[in-house]
Image (cartoon, helix red, strand yellow):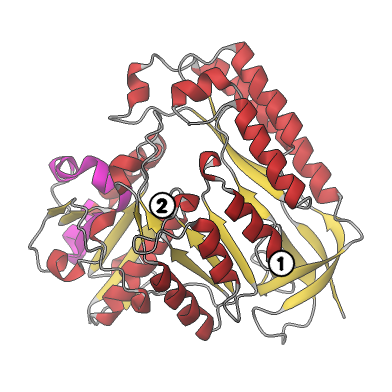
């Protein structure tokens, strides 16, 4: 029997690509296995956003070299690092059978037949077959609405690894959403590198129009989306969120820096003032909104004053959650020509201070739930305590709670919050 094993690094887009690969292989008679030693095909679906991910992939390929000698398994490297490195992967690891970029996920037959050992094109026909998706959640479906990015931030490699923006047709997205709901998925998450840059290639309808249309599909109990770009936040997007109660009151809006000077060097297309104005517009329409963000510390030329502006912006916005990293130089990006990154010790100290501030804000927000009854979408048993049930609030906090496990997955339950833990909430389901 033909068997396959997939290992995935990176964002939701990579996870969804793995679901596409898994579904496509199953349609071709393969069986998925959890042990790489039992696989006749091993796929590494890779990320290239940070240097450590790259190092991890090549280290993993070194391990698989010995396994290949024993099992003769085919080895394929997919995803963003595959697109970035291409032939260089095979030069460094000649036991790899093929390298496939994200634009070629729909071309499995040609790849497996050996027609292309290195496939890095971005075909006009992306062959997006949502019926073949091997969705891993019984309650949630990721739905790609736009691929690639046109923003060209100076630190970012995504335009190289994912290509230029290509939006899917409006009706095609709605068809996939309806199909997902028909299989019991009650939570939909729309995905794109710059999800709110969506424009239907046929009608020109924008992201706000799509949000409203998806929210109005019968059976969509909760609708999320990511990742949004601050420069693409439109009035129609805000109105759609305001007017549809099933659109999550959670918005990931990466700021990257609180300094307008650094933002210009990053080519982020907005200033500190514009970002705060956008936050204000959204909060005026949706007061209960929970923001999360991304921050890069130690970007080339970042001064103490620049960093203090980031700290003050974080203090002003009070994000519920944050993903923050030291700047990681990526090959071929314009930031390499801007200058040297900030000294690592200084960047580390800044990152520590930023996390300490964010931890205080997160703690205050989590504690604010104590004693409240909040709606929670039930997703299954708790990961760390099978005696408890687990789900998420509308604004994306994980809640572990006592309740009746016979309740159908995807049910919306009221949960009284009793305790705020480090990253999660704890409580009990109530009638």
Image quadrant where residue 134 sits: bottom left
Residue 70 is one of the magenta-drawn residues: yes
Q: Image height check: is 331 above or below 282?
A: above
Image quadrant where residue 400 sits: bottom right
For residue 396, say whether it is visible: no
For residue 305, say whether it is visible: yes
Q: Nearer the viewer, residue 85 or 372?
A: 372
Q: Image height check: is 341 above or below 293?
A: above
At which x and y percent is residue 298? 52, 21
User: Which range is magenta?
Assistant: 65-92
Q: Earlier in the sequence, mark 1 or mark 2?
A: 2
Q: Nearer the viewer, residue 77 or 430?
A: 430
State the separation of the CA atoms marked 1 and 2: 33 Å
Which residue occupies the extreme right position in the image? 371
Circle on res. 9:
2
Secondary structure of residue under mark 2: loop
Quadrant placement of the C terminus? bottom right
Q: At 46% from the left edge and 81% from the top edge, which residue is drawn?
A: 179
Q: Nearer the viewer, residue 166 or 116?
A: 166
At which x and y percent is residue 412? 73, 76
Circle on res. 53:
none
Q: Which residue is mark 1?
A: 245
At which x and y percent is residue 124? 21, 59
Q: At 61% from the left edge and 41% from the top edge, which residue is drawn?
A: 293
Which residue occupies the extreme front position in the image? 203
Q: What predominant SS class does the magenta segment belong to?
A: helix
Residue 68 is one of the magenta-drawn residues: yes
Q: Image height check: is 164 above or below 144?
A: above
Left or right position of 392 against 163: right
Within 10 Å of disc 2 (Cα), the crowding (few <14, some 14-19, many 20+) is some
């Amino acid at each position: 029997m033909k068997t396959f094993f997939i290992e995935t690094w990176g964002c939701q887009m990579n996870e969804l690509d793995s679901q596409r690969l898994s579904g496509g292989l199953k349609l071709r008679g393969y069986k998925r296995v959890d042990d790489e030693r039992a696989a006749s095909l091993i796929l590494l679906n890779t990320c290239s956003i940070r240097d450590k991910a790259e190092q991890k992939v090549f280290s993993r390929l070194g391990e698989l070299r010995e396994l290949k000698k024993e099992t003769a398994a085919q080895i394929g490297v997919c995803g963003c690092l595959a697109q970035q490195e291409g032939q260089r992967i095979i030069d460094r690891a000649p036991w790899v059978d093929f390298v496939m970029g994200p634009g070629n996920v729909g071309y499995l037959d040609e790849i497996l037949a050996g027609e292309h050992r290195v496939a890095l094109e971005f075909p006009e026909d992306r062959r997006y077959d949502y019926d073949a998706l091997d969705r891993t959640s019984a309650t949630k479906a990721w739905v790609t609405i736009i691929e690639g990015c046109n923003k060209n931030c100076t630190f970012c490699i995504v335009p190289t690894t994912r290509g230029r923006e290509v939006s899917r047709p409006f009706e095609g997205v709605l068809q996939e959403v309806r199909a997902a709901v028909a299989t019991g998925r009650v939570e939909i998450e729309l995905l794109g590198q710059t999800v709110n840059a969506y424009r239907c290639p046929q009608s020109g309808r924008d992201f706000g129009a799509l949000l409203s249309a998806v929210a109005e599909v019968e059976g969509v109990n909760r609708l999320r989306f990511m990742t949004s770009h601050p420069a693409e936040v439109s009035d129609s997007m805000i109105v759609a969120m305001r007017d549809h109660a099933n659109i999550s009151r959670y918005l990931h809006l990466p700021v990257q820096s609180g300094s307008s000077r650094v933002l210009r060097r990053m080519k982020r297309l907005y200033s500190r003032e514009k970002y705060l104005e956008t936050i204000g517009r959204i909060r005026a329409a949706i007061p209960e909104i929970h923001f999360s963000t991304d921050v890069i510390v130690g970007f080339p030329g970042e001064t103490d004053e620049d960093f203090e502006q980031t700290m003050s912006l974080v203090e002003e916005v009070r994000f519920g959650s944050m993903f923050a990293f030291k700047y990681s130089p990526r090959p071929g990006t314009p930031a390499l020509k801007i200058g040297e990154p900030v000294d690592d010790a200084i960047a580390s100290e800044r990152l520590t201070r930023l996390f300490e501030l964010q931890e205080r804000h997160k703690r205050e927000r989590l504690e604010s739930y104590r004693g409240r009854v909040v709606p929670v979408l039930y997703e299954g048993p708790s990961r760390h305590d099978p005696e408890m049930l687990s789900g998420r609030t509308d604004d994306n906090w994980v809640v572990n709670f006592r309740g009746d496990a016979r309740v159908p997955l995807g049910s919306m339950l009221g949960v009284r919050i009793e305790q705020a833990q480090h990253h999660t909430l704890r409580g009990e389901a109530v009638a």
